[in-house]
Image (cartoon, helix red, strand yellow):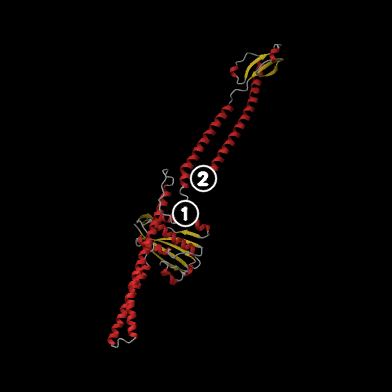
Amino acid sequence: MKSYNKICAAVFAVWIILTIIANLYLLSLSRYNNDRSYRVEISRIAREIAKNGYHEPDFSRYEYVTDITVYSGDDSFYNTDSDYSILKINDILYRFDYNTEKRTDIHRLMLFVNSILGIMILLLLAVMFYIRRRILQPFAHLIDVPYALSKGNLTAPIEETKNHFFGNFVWGLNMLREHIEQQKQRELTLQKEKKTLLLSLSHDIKTPLSAIKLYAKALSKGLYEDKAKQLEITDQINAKADEIEGFVDEIISASRTDLLSLDVTMGEFYLSTLLNHISDYYLEKLSLIKTDFSLGTYNDCLLKGDLDRAVEVLQNIMENAIKYGDGKSISLHMSEEEGCSLISVENTGCSLNEGELPHIFDSFFRGSNTAHQAGSGLGLYICRQLMHKMNGEIFAEVKDETMVVSIVFEKV
């Protein structure tokens, strides 16, 4: 806000300087014109007298000359309070009384210019005050909000200002705050459920495990000499082992439970809308890193799904192509198959092992070609979850060191 105040002061100072310069210039121009104008007027009258003789003129016709006196030998000829100029015309002296204090067009222009400058500075100050009061001051209250959100302060909602300049921004921040809060609650609930499950399964495992240890100890000490009894004990051990294996499977299944809550709002959108979102951004981005980008031809059609989520999926795939490709070229190709629309992202320089290809959509899986790249291994996993929720599909293949990731949407 201090910087804005300095800008306002600088604007006002510049206005004052310009006003002073304009007035000084107009004043100098006024003096020059006054000095020249009355002489021009006297010269014109003198020419008329020299040509036609002297006749009492109509002084209302003149702007500066107020009186003409013919010299008659009287000394009063030279005694007057007004400004005058004496000319000799046809051997007769004439005194021309004049007045230079009359209002001129320059003075009217000065009044007009100063009025305009005054109105302009008043309007400018009003606009700057409005910007300060209605835009900058409300925005100042939002400066610390992202930092507070990053620190986990999710309690108080953000109040929307009455002028609605930041309506979408405030609404978006509130949505982000609520989403983070919901995610936090989901995570806490999930962690609680998993801990409860693990504690329960751990307790349940102890019972068959104790029985196995007991049977094994009895067999080691030869307590069961009967062959049939020994086989029965062996079957019991196998049964308890199967029971433990079942508990272990439950633990593994729980560990694979989705950690992310991915909401999808099903609707309809045009293929061109989705592709425009991608091309508008990546044409510039890829040109900056000197990567060739091409968009294939396609027939526009209406697709089923969530446009925002579809953009998210395609962006994830594009980012992977940039990160793990060789940076030479990336292309988008569209095709149609059995009532579906396919969008394929191809990038050169694929170094993924063929054996790893079936696992790239698993959670937390990172291929051998990602050793020097940061990541969580969730990008393509999230893409697959989103595509499944939109009743679509995603798959990948490698063709001659070219990685091809395709997403499938149902057509309307």
Residue 127 lies, in percent from the top left, at 49, 39
In terms of secondary structure, where does tag 2 sit?
Answer: loop
Q: Is residue 53 visible?
A: no
**What residue is rendered at 32% in x and 75% in y?**
207
**What residue is rendered at 51% in x and 35% in y?**
122
Which numbered circle lies on residue 355? none
Q: Is residue 100 above or below residue 309?
A: above
Residue 363 lies, in percent from the top left, at 41, 66
Labels 2 and 1: the sequence-earlier one = 2
- Separation of disc 2 and disc 1 at Cα? 19 Å
Q: Is residue 332 left or right of residue 50?
A: left
Q: Is residue 207 left or right of residue 172?
A: left
In terms of secondary structure, where does tag 1 sit?
Answer: helix
Q: Which residue is mark 2?
A: 1
In terms of depth relative to the viewer, which is nearer, 217 or 229? 217
**Quarter placement of the C terminus:** bottom left
Residue 78 occupies quadrant: top right
- Of the residues shown, which amino acid type is indicated by label 1? Tyr
Q: Is residue 69 visible?
A: yes
| Crowd class of label 1 (few under 14; some 14 to 19; many from 20; radius 10 Å) | few
Q: Is residue 227 left or right of residue 25?
A: left
In terms of depth relative to the viewer, which is nearer, 17 or 209? 209
Tell me whether the residue at label 2 lies in contact with that at label 1, contact meaning CB atoms closer than 8 angstroms.
Answer: no
**What residue is rendered at 34% in x and 71% in y?**
201
| Crowd class of label 2 (few under 14; some 14 to 19; many from 20; radius 10 Å) | few
- Of the residues shown, which amino acid type is indicated by label 2? Met
Residue 318 lies, in percent from the top left, at 45, 61
Q: Is residue 64 above or below residue 370?
A: above
Residue 220 lies, in percent from the top left, at 35, 85
In terms of depth relative to the viewer, which is nearer, 393 or 400? 393
Q: Which residue is mark 1?
A: 147
